[in-house]
Image (cartoon, rainbow, N blue to C red):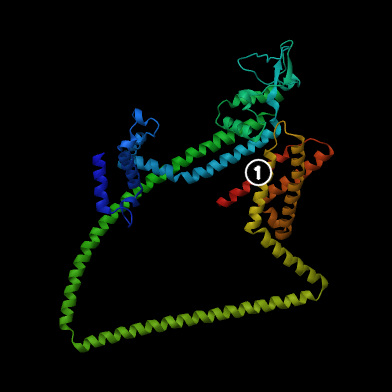
Amino acid sequence: MGIFCFEFLLKVIAFGFVLHKGSYLRSGWNIMDFIVVASGVVTMMPFTSSDGEGRGSVDLRTLRAVRVLRPLKLVSGLQVVLKSILYAMAPLLQIGLLVLFAIVIFAIIGLEFYSGIFHSACYNAHGEIENLSDRPFPCSNKSAATGAYNCEVEGTVCLTQWIGPNYGITSFDNIAFAMITVFQCITMEGWTTVMYYTNDSLGSTYNWAYFIPLIVLGSFFMLNLVLGVLSGEFAKERERVENRREFLKLRRQQQIERELNGYLEWILTAEEVILKEERTTEEEKAAIMEARRRTAAKKLKQANKRQSTETEEDIEEEDEDEDDYLNEESEGKRAKRTFWGSICKKVRHMRVQMRLIVKSQVFYWLVITLVFLNTACVASEHYGQPEWFTEFLKYAEYVFSGIFICEMLMKLFAMGHRVYFASKFNRFDCIVIVGSAFEVIWAELKGGSFGISVLRALRLLRIFKLTS
């Protein structure tokens, strides 16, 4: 520890501590080294002892484990790995948000179709679950032809009284448990068991359409993006280190050559100046100074001439703009002569104002906030929810549908149908809005749901436009 402290003092004396550029604490590796030394000094203090008298105090000697970080400063390969991980934090954060977004989407879809299906089990006459294997599994009262499991043991009946697999954690009853179950599936840890549970409860006809995209997108694609980012950052950091090493080597050679050439040039120039000063008379010196003054005056005159030319061009452009403005004003006067012309002008003015509103940041973030709130309402639906909460979600859906319809109409009026439908986000948003309105009308007339409401969460894709 004394050697490390002596090294620290030598570097502080040589480079300075922190105030000026190039000082000791201006380097990240020196900061880490300082933390190691400081923690080592603290662990040597008397109050850090862990004897019988100080059992109630904090044992700071555990900070000695920080000393293992010192080799990171000495080995260049370890520095490359550590820097690669640090540089990958920002891309990994974006990938983490993307994975979280996918988990939320699949959790909402599972909440829509699988809520409350894992609470049925086969009970005997004594009220106990009849197990055919090590652990209980769901059952169904549907026909076995669909692939659902019916209670085959005599004297058993399928009742909705079971807490569910893994003490009710593996379920789609609410958004929290649904996200945990989806995360379990994308890690490929027991995802087949979850799929078999859904097959036992609902049959095996359509469940593959949920689990196959979940595994392909969530596990094979998104989680492997993390490895791709780390690999790419490691390759870039390694290339950066090699390029820096070559650059420093080349710059050192150039600096040596430049210093040598400059020294020789300085000697030769000094000799020429000395010889010229000895040969030059007073009249020749005055002629040289006069020639320099003429050259400076000529350059100043050319600069003034160039500035005046640019001013004339600006005046001509302003005249052209004024002529264009007068032409537009005359066209406006001709349009005002007719009734329809004035109406068209007012409509155009309204479209311009509406376009400014629609393209403003306030409107954009307002819509994003409403999308988050709508997604939260869809995700808040859970198994066994009270009747008043169901009514609240129903009327909230009416309100959000009306707001998003108004948003779509505002954009159509402001941008026109060609510009509006040129955006893929707007096309998808239009499909979701029309589908949501159709689902609301169908639920009022016939009852039931088509599951289109889960697509509303996909509107959160708008947030990824910020990364462009």
Q: Name the residue nearer the viewer: 289 or 160.
A: 160
Would residue 362 appear left or right of 398 to someone viewing this image? left
Q: Quadrant of the image for the N terminus?
A: top left
Quarter of the image holding residue 411?
bottom right
**Residue 124 found in image quarter:** top right
Residue at coordinates 59% horizontally, 32% vertically from top-left?
180
Q: Residues within 10 Å of mark 1 (few under 14, many from 20)?
A: some
Image-quadrant location for residue 44: top left
Residue at the (30%, 83%) spot, across then down: 292
Under mark 1, the amino acid is: Leu
Given residues 91 and 58, the one toward you in this image is 58
Q: Farthest residue in the top direction?
A: 154
Of residues 70 and 307, the one drawn nearer to the viewer in this rendering: 70
- Please tell me which residue is depicted at 74% across the width and 51% down the height of the picture: 403
Count of numbered circles in the view: 1
Where does residue 12 sit, x and y in percent of width and height? 27, 51
Task: Report helix, strand or loop for mark 1.
Answer: helix
Q: Position of residue 351 (x, y in %)?
A: 72, 63
| Residue closest to the far front | 53
Question: Please, which residue is most extreme toward the bottom here?
Answer: 283
> Is residue 203 in view?
no
Where's residue 412, x and y in %?
Answer: 73, 56
* Mark 1 lies on residue: 458
- Answer above or below: position of 468 versus 146: below
Can the viewer see residue 34 in this picture? Answer: yes
Q: Is residue 137 above or below residue 46?
A: above
Q: Residue at x 26, y 55 (%)?
A: 252
Of the pair 67 and 273, the residue shown nearer to us? 67
Picture coordinates of residue 289 (x, y %)? 27, 85
